[in-house]
Image: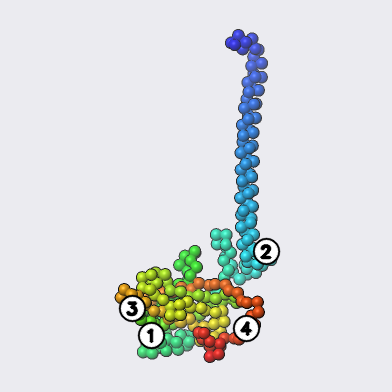
Amino acid sequence: MMKVWTQIPTWGIIVIIIGVVFILATIAFIILLKRYLKRKKEFLEEQKVIDSYYKNIIDAVGKIQNIEKVEQVGSRLSRGVIMKKIAQFFKVSFDQFFIDFSNLYPSVKEKEIREIYNKIMLPKRATQGSAGYDFYTPVMITLKPHESIQIPTGIRVKIEPGWLLQIYPKSSHGIKYRLQLDNTVGIIDSDYFFAKNEGHILVSISNNSNEQKTLKIFPNKAFCQGIFMEYGITIDDETNEKRIGGFGSTKQ
């Protein structure tokens, strides 16, 4: 064998080496090309899934022609989901707050009521992922077992038609004290904003604890939460009544 190699001229050995290198390079190129094509195929499949996902989002907000409208009302894209901004919280006027507060707490003087009013906090979410807007009590709440109280929040909310606000107790209070709303779930309709009482949200709660626990919530601490929900109506709905009064009223 060695004799054969020694008989091959130098230029022949060089040709053989070049040929071997070329073959190895070709094999490596083919392997890399296969990997590239495989990765490209996977990428295109992933892109199809992503495109389909965003298409579903666009369809959910009413097709592509409505995206401009969604942006105009202030929608926010969060983790690939378009969040519709359909409401805004306000404080009721001091005059309205004074009326409702005085009816519930007649012994409190106007000066103190004004101080309470000035400290009212608008509802807000605790985190980006929170669905509920925390409502804060403007007064100290002390509820013994099986006692109830009505809280004038000083808050009103303007809601786009087709949406409502549901009021629930805070989960932590519900677990620890069996805190419940007296009407189970509060429903704030979009037209309540235009009621005679300015759409003032009053929340009635009860401590239904069976363990003799007294509930204490300090002023400006969260005691309930509101979640916005979209709703529909029946095909043959012909309601044309307009709200005039307060909670649960179209006549008062």
Q: Percent position (x, y) of residue 57?
A: 61, 62
* Residue 80 at x, y percent in the picture: 57, 59
Q: Where is residue 235 in the image (x, y as percent from the top left)?
A: 65, 77
Q: Which of marks 3 and 4 is nearer the N terminus?
A: 3
Q: Can residue 123 be seen in this view?
A: no
Give the CA separation, mark 2 to mark 1. Answer: 53 Å
Q: Which of marks 2 and 3 is in front?
A: 3
Task: Assign the N terminus to one quadrant of the image.
Answer: top right
For label 2, the residue is 64
Query: How many marks on residues?
Result: 4
Q: Which amino acid does label 4 sit on?
A: Thr
Position of 229 with respect to 51 (left or right) is left
Colour mapping: rainbow
**Residue 23 against residue 78 in the figure, above or below:** above
Height in image: 124 above or below 249?
Answer: above
Labels 1 & 4 near each other (Cβ < 8 A): no
- Number of the front mark, 2 or 1: 2
Q: In terms of secondary structure, where does tag 1 sit?
A: helix
Viewer-side label of 4, 2: 4
Check disc 3 and give the amino acid type. Answer: Pro
Residue at mark 1 to residue at mark 4: CA–CA distance: 43 Å
Horizontal side, residue 98 vs residue 235: left or right: left
User: Residue placed farthest to the right in the image?
Assistant: 65
How far apart are labels 1 and 3 at the CA level?
28 Å
**Cα–Cα span, label 4 and label 2:** 32 Å
Residue at the disc numbered 1:
112
